[in-house]
Image (cartoon, coloured by chain):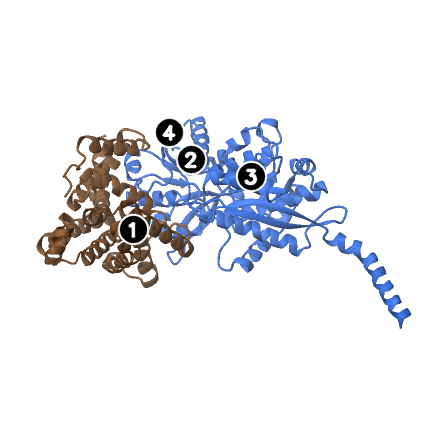
């Protein structure tokens, strides 16, 4: 039993890091822009297809493809912001929600036409690492390490660069930030771009160990919402923490009960946190 | 001049009167076949192949002038279909539309047991014959339907052959673990497999289901008890492919991995080393050995194209795409209907039903014969599964080989290499 438990816990935590990166993007967008991005899952799926395309068509190593996918996603985020969000930013939550939902439907529609819903698989293995009785999968280990690196980089960017400080300033008080000469439009576009980039990176890393379709992002988007609430809406580091909790739960729960109980436990915790500590376990920022 | 013109008109009229019945006899009827296709949603791959097979049949029948009735009437085939989005609720709505608004004469089921089950209710309610293809759940045929006919081998016989392979290769095998998707089809398959294994005196220490759409199977794989000889189960393409990959990466020391649906698909080879050794049941394979000669030896009628002809026709229409068993099932569903209409000599539902009840034939897809007992009416009794196994070819690339039953095998099955 203990062997099962520890193996499942480690597997779950490794996946949890990637969940955390995906949720971090959603959390950043909410924290700075107050936008619930319903195109987050679809963007993750695009990240998966980007890595797949680079690997199968150009033979680029998936991990080298991730930075390229990140750059493309950043630009894609700017585009979405400019075309779909900028004009409705002042119109309230419902308008931005509908705008991102429309973007989501467009991505899925075009993606289904181009790629069909046939499952794709990045046939890339890093082997596995035997540690005692446990077998750690190479792709998951690298994804977890990459997630930590990205989290640290995002933290350093937000807290120690001028642009990062501008993002935090807009997040805290947009009017005051503008009075200080910060262009909130540029900051909002950058924030959406960064959130989209994190989604695509999470998607790209996920593609190295799970097959996917253009519809795969939906499930991860739902997880991201749960994680954001667990860790604290608008708190990127809390998102990583929430990702680890969710990953651990997904690993541990099936050891003791049928897997159908996983969402019951996850969403039970979700409701509990909303009731007892609405700001999330690490508090919203 | 006036007399000449009158003569020409009279000649023309006479010609039209004489030739009109001949023209009418060549193609004076048509039928509308209605179905839904999962052009979007999770069943897109299998459903598209199934529809490709069915469309090929329609094209072939119409090119030959239509379905030929004994009285010389030719019946052209037309189709009408909608995208069901792989969604059960959409299926019932769309089949109602096909029957009520589009006036479909006969129906073909959508892909998958869940969707076909939803469609079968409508067919029976509206008194329309439906040929199910891509659906192998036994439970559809335990509801007393009289107008629904099955093309596939029933789910209850899907994985039992894999257990026979395991016991043949390792008579000392005692334990199997079963991990399956929690859907109608997969549950039917593994429930029958569990009973079959227990009847053979084997233990099933793990019998667990996972939700449709699951991606992480590590929690299940970690739970597989030590000393298990074989692991069997799976569900549909996406989840089964993921399961096979994680099973390989986790180095599970089981001698056999037998999974549903995905292994016979050519895309399964994308798994690389992870697909090697995996066994899967297939309704049909391009290297199937069914032939008119073999049918004659069994004193069973042959109907439709040979395997080679089907392969040629399919590649001529769809290019590089190799037909899968879903494609063959789509074509075979058309053949079942065609044979029924030809034998009935009518398009009347009751007469065609009586004719299909009596069908016993070999086609490129294998034998077709239906259970006609009241409790299991329409269940496929004649068709048998072929088991394939992935191996490495001389260049080290994955190749698919038929390994069971012996009569259809091109090589003997082998156990997985356990590290």
Q: How far apart are marks 1 and 2 (CA)?
A: 27 Å
Q: What element carries label 3?
A: helix
Distance between the Cα atoms at labels 3 and 2? 24 Å
In the picture, measured across the screen, residue B210 lies left or right of residue B118, that is left
Q: How far apart are marks 3 and 1 (CA)?
A: 37 Å
**Mark 4 vs mark 3, CA separation in Å:** 43 Å
Mark 3 falls within which chain?
A: B
Q: Residue at label 4? A: B204
Chain identity of mark 2: B
**What residue did someone put label 1 on?**
A44
Q: For chain B, what colour was chosen?
A: blue
Residue B77 pos. (x, y %) = 64, 50
Q: In which quarter of the image is residue B378?
A: top right
Q: Distance between the residues labelled 1 and 4?
A: 39 Å
Residue B413 percent location from the top left of the image: 44, 44
Q: Mark 3 points at which residue?
A: B96
The numbered mark, 4 or 2, whose residue comes first in the sequence reads 2
């Amino acid at each position: 039993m203990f062997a099962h438990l520890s193996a499942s816990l480690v597997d779950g935590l490794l996946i949890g890091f990637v969940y955390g990166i995906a949720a971090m993007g959603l959390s950043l967008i909410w924290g700075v822009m107050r936008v619930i991005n319903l195109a987050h899952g679809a963007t993750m799926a695009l990240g998966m297809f980007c890595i797949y395309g680079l690997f199968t068509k150009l033979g680029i190593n998936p991990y080298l493809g991730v930075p390229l996918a990140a750059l493309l996603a950043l630009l894609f985020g700017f585009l979405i912001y400019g075309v779909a969000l900028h004009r409705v930013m002042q119109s309230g939550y419902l308008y931005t929600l509908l705008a991102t939902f429309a973007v989501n439907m467009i991505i899925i529609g075009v993606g289904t036409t181009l790629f069909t819903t046939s499952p794709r698989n990045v046939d890339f293995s890093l082997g596995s690492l035997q540690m005692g009785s446990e077998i750690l999968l190479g792709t998951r280990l690298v994804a977890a390490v990459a997630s930590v690196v990205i989290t640290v980089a995002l933290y350093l960017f937000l807290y120690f660069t001028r642009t990062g400080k501008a993002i935090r300033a807009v997040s805290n008080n947009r009017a005051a930030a503008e009075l200080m000469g910060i262009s909130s439009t540029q900051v909002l576009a950058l924030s959406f771009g960064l959130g989209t980039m994190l989604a695509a990176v999470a998607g790209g890393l996920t593609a190295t160990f799970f097959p996917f379709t253009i519809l795969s992002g939906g499930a991860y988007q739902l997880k991201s919402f749960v994680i954001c609430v667990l860790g604290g809406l608008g708190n990127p580091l809390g998102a990583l923490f929430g990702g680890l909790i969710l990953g651990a739960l997904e690993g541990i729960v099936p050891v003791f009960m049928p897997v159908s109980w996983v969402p019951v436990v996850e969403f039970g915790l979700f409701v509990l946190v909303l009731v007892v500590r609405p700001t999330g376990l690490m508090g919203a920022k | 001049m006036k007399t000449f013109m009158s003569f020409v008109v009279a000649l023309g009229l006479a010609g039209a009167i004489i030739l009109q019945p001949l023209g009418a006899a060549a193609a004076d009827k048509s039928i509308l076949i209605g179905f839904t296709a999962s052009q979007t949603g999770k069943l897109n791959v299998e459903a598209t192949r199934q529809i490709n097979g069915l469309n090929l049949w329609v094209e072939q029948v119409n090119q030959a002038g239509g379905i030929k009735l004994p009285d010389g009437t030719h019946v052209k085939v037309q189709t009408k279909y909608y995208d069901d989005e792989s969604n059960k609720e959409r299926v019932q709505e769309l089949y109602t539309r096909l029957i009520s608004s589009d006036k479909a004469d006969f129906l073909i089921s959508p892909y998958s047991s869940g969707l076909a089950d939803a469609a079968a209710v409508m067919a029976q309610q509206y008194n329309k014959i439906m040929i199910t293809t891509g659906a192998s759940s036994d439970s559809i045929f335990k509801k007393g339907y009289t107008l629904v006919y099955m093309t596939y081998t029933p789910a209850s016989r899907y994985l039992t052959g894999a257990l026979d392979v395991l016991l043949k290769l390792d008579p000392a095998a005692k334990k199997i673990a079963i991990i399956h998707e929690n859907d109608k089809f997969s549950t039917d398959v593994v429930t029958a497999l569990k009973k079959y294994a227990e009847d053979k005196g084997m233990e099933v220490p793990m019998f667990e289901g996972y939700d449709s759409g699951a991606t992480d199977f590590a929690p299940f794989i970690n739970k597989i008890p030590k000393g298990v000889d074989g692991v069997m189960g799976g569900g549909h393409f996406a989840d089964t492919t993921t399961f096979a990959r994680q099973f390989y990466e986790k180095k599970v020391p089981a001698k056999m991995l037998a999974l549903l649906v995905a292994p016979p698909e050519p895309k399964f080879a994308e798994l690389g080393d992870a697909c090697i050794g995996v066994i899967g049941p297939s309704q049909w394979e391009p290297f199937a050995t069914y032939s008119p000669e073999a049918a004659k030896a069994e004193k069973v009628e042959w109907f439709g194209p040979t395997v080679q002809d089907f392969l040629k026709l399919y590649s001529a229409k769809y290019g590089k795409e190799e037909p899968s068993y879903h494609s063959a099932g789509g074509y075979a569903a058309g053949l079942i209907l065609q044979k029924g209409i030809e034998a009935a000599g009518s398009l009347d539902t009751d007469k065609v039903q009586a004719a299909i009840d009596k069908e016993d034939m070999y086609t490129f897809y294998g034998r077709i014969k239906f259970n006609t007992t009241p409790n299991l009416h329409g269940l496929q009794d004649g068709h048998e599964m072929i088991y394939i196994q992935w191996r490495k070819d001389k260049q080290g690339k994955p190749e698919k080989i038929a390994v069971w039953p012996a009569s259809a095998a091109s090589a003997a099955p082998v156990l997985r290499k356990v590290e």
